[in-house]
Amino acid sequence: MFRFRLGSIPVEVHSFHLLASAVFGWSFASYASQVGPPWLAEYVLEEGHPRYGAAIAAYVLAWMFIVFVSVVVHELGHAIFFRAFGYQPNIVLVWLGGETYPNAPSPIPWHKSVLSTLAGPLFGLLLGAVCWVGATVVGGHSLALDFFLFWFLRANLFWAALNLLPVPPLDGGHVTTTLASRFFGRAGFIAAQGLALLISLAMVAWGLRTGSLLLPVFFAMWGFQCVRAIRDAFQAGRMGEAQQPLAEALRQAQGALSKGALDEARALATPVLEAGEALTPQLSSHAHHLLGWVAVKGGQGRLALDHFAQVQGQPVESHALAAAFSLVGDETRALPLWEMAWRDTGDRTVMHEYGGSLLRAGKRDAALKLPGVDLAATFSCAERVLFIRGAYSEAAAMGEAALDYVPNPQIAYDAACAFAKAHNASDAVRLLHRAKALGYRDAAYAASDEDLAPLHGHPGFEAWLTELRQSAAS
């Protein structure tokens, strides 16, 4: 497996993709002269020729390159449209194809889903058109160039046409299913799956008649999936009335979570998991995913991990897992997840959380070298998680260390709160004076702050609070 980026879009290539494309190229080489352009036949070497092995190897490598570029361009079409709609996509190449994940925070509207899906075949057709123009303009000057232009054109035309067939999981199948479901509901979904089943059977028959191996296998598998989808749709129709209130509860819980109303979101989502036979795996995963986020935002790392472990059929965001591991104090597992989340999203908040994780892991130099890092935000992230975990002395030490880099009044005040929670009154008062010297002035908040409650009645704290009020009044 290897990774690279196309601009801001991360691409992950599994070893199975390279292996599958190599096997495809090798199987294609045996009858290249029959299916290739006429001018290629004279260059095809017969078995036993001294350079036959090298020719086969070159042919396989060429096809690996053709498959790789064609699939990347196809998936890039999906990714660019997802990016244009404000999502943070990533591309994964597996077997002879790929998958583009939009990483959307909520379900994608149907029209955006359709446009993003059609963008893949469109980009393939555009690549084929570029190769056709190239063959027209510069064809005949180089055997290698002619070979690549010829096969890039035909491979991308074939790949685009195949993907537009209305058979899930192909792009055409996704589009027809989405549109049929959008405008005709469950009946439209069943009709779309029935059409896909008929086409799958026809492609299996055609593949067997022409001697193809891959097409019958894939379309037989996809046809079987259509049968299961139709069966599940009929079962869902019988259970629909029971599931509708559950789905509505989760929708309301998602809205409460987006507004920061954690108690409301938890109260709405928790009963869904107790719904008995009406609870489908999809609804269960949705509820666990939502409650995992509620736990993360509420500082309950262990509970978040328990919920995320029960999510199936949908990805759990890497920064959610990273936050959960950080909350339980497992920075060894959190660090690679924070780094992945930062590189995939480019989000500065995620970068500062990553920096905070580095600081908590004792890797201060690495945290300070993050590009464009805001030291105040990074140290605050590091201190906040320690505070939530109840490691008050460590949180206070982290905050005080931050003042060597960022003389910030809020950081000094937060460090004083951590010292107070650790029942270290002398250091808490010392940091409060440091916060005041740096410009902290909110006496009313400090007087009512529960984190400073252990200092109430302490002479040093009361004197500091009096001075703060007098400064504010003057």
Image (cartoon, helix red, strand yellow):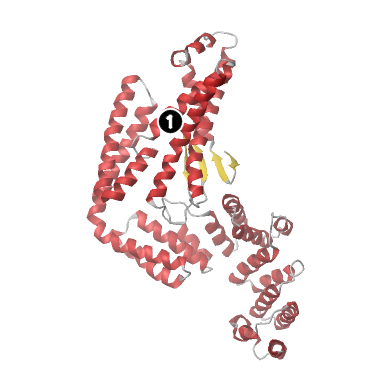
| Residue at position x 45%, y 60% in the image | 307
Residue to which mark 1 is pinned: 159
Secondary structure at badge 1 equals helix
| Residue at position x 58%, y 70% in the image | 388
Asked if residue 96 can be seen in this view, the reply is no
Residue 107, quarter of picture: bottom left
* Residue situated furthest left in the rendering: 238
Task: Name the spot of residue 216 as percent of width and height, x first.
Answer: 34, 28
Residue 275, quarter of picture: bottom left
Task: Name the spot of residue 194 as percent of width and height, x first.
Answer: 26, 39
201 to the left or right of 66: left
Tell which of 408 and 54 is nearer to you: 408
361 to the left or right of 86: right
387 to the left or right of 163: right
| Residue at position x 68%, y 62% in the image | 374
* Residue situated furthest front in the rendering: 137
Compared with 272, 427 (above or below) is below
Compared with 135, 110 (above or below) is below
Query: What amino acid does circle 1 point to?
Result: Trp
Compared with 21, 274 (above or below) is below
Task: Name the spot of residue 408 as percent of width and height, x first.
Answer: 71, 72
Asked if residue 167 can be seen in this view, the reply is yes
| Residue at position x 56%, y 45% in the image | 9
Q: The N terminus appears in which quarter of the rendering?
A: top right
How packed is label 1: few (under 14 Cα within 10 Å), some, or many (20 or more)? some
Q: The C terminus appears in which quarter of the rendering?
A: bottom right
Tell which of 265 and 221 is nearer to you: 265
Task: Report the number of discs.
Answer: 1
Task: Name the spot of residue 143 as percent of width and height, x first.
Answer: 57, 16
